[in-house]
Image: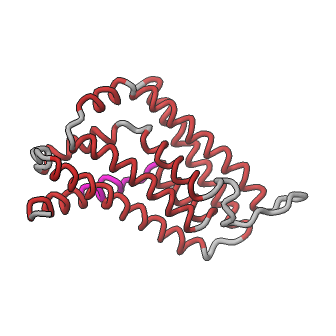
Amino acid sequence: MTAQYLALFAKAYILGFVIAMPVGPITALILRRTITGGLPVGVATGLGAAVADALYGGCAAFGLSAVTTFLEGEARLLGLIGGAILLWLGIRGFVSAGRRGGDAGVPPVPAGDGREIGGVAPAFVSSVALTLTNPLTILSYAAAFAGIGLAAAGSVGAATATTLGLGLGSATWQLVIVAAAGGARRWLKGRVLATVDRLSGVVLVGFGMVALVRAAYG
């Protein structure tokens, strides 16, 4: 890789890291899954989001205008799908929290068994799908490219270096969240864990409702 490609990679890495930082539904999902499902499930969720970011960033880096146009045209539908998924995840998590807390007459479900999520692979796939329902990501990358000089990359090698940088930058931030949640998980037991689970479910429901309203009336 030439010095030019390394410079593009470094810029894209920082950009991917920064764009992934704002707190949103994916952040809430990573936190919840890490705390209640364990580190492997949290890592899978975070990497799924990073892969989706890399896909959208790649579309912008390679100048795939047809994809961008399609996503802009289907933004409402994608928003409705994403909102519905968030609602489902939040409600499901809230209901499962009662079992995890050991409510009367119901055997508690140990935290970290991954039963609710279905394992590492479903966590990864669902995270990719949920992140892809936000077409604003590709528009954010396209605007940022123009602002920091990445739009003029102009070759397959440069676009590839940019895409890799974006994906790895996003992955780094997602794994920071996983590490923080994993550290907190050691101190959360029993009913405290169930309470955190319920709260995270409510947060996901809130994000889902906001996404649905924006898609329907935005």
The structure residue drawn at horizontal position 22% and vertical position 41%, both measured from the top left corner, is: 142
- Asked if residue 143 lies left or right of residue 108, the reply is left
Residue 129: % across, % down? 48, 42
Residue 1, magenta (yes or no): no
The structure residue drawn at horizontal position 37% and vertical position 60%, both measured from the top left corner, is: 171
Q: How many marks?
A: 0
Q: Name the quadrant containing residue 72.
A: top left
Screen quadrant of the C terminus: top left
The structure residue drawn at horizontal position 32% and vertical position 61%, both measured from the top left corner, is: 168
Residue 186: % across, % down? 61, 76
* Colour basis: secondary structure
- Asked if residue 131 lies left or right of residue 185, the reply is left
Name the magenta segment's main secondary structure. helix
Q: Name the quadrant containing residue 191.
A: bottom right
The structure residue drawn at horizontal position 75% and vertical position 61%, both measured from the top left corner, is: 100
Q: Is residue 137 above or below residue 4?
A: above
Residue 66: % across, % down? 26, 28
Q: Is residue 27 above or below residue 172?
A: above
Comparing 205 with 9, the one in front is 9
Residue 119: % across, % down? 62, 57
- Asked if residue 136 lies left or right of residue 47, the reply is left
Q: Which contiguous range is marked in magenta?
A: 15-24
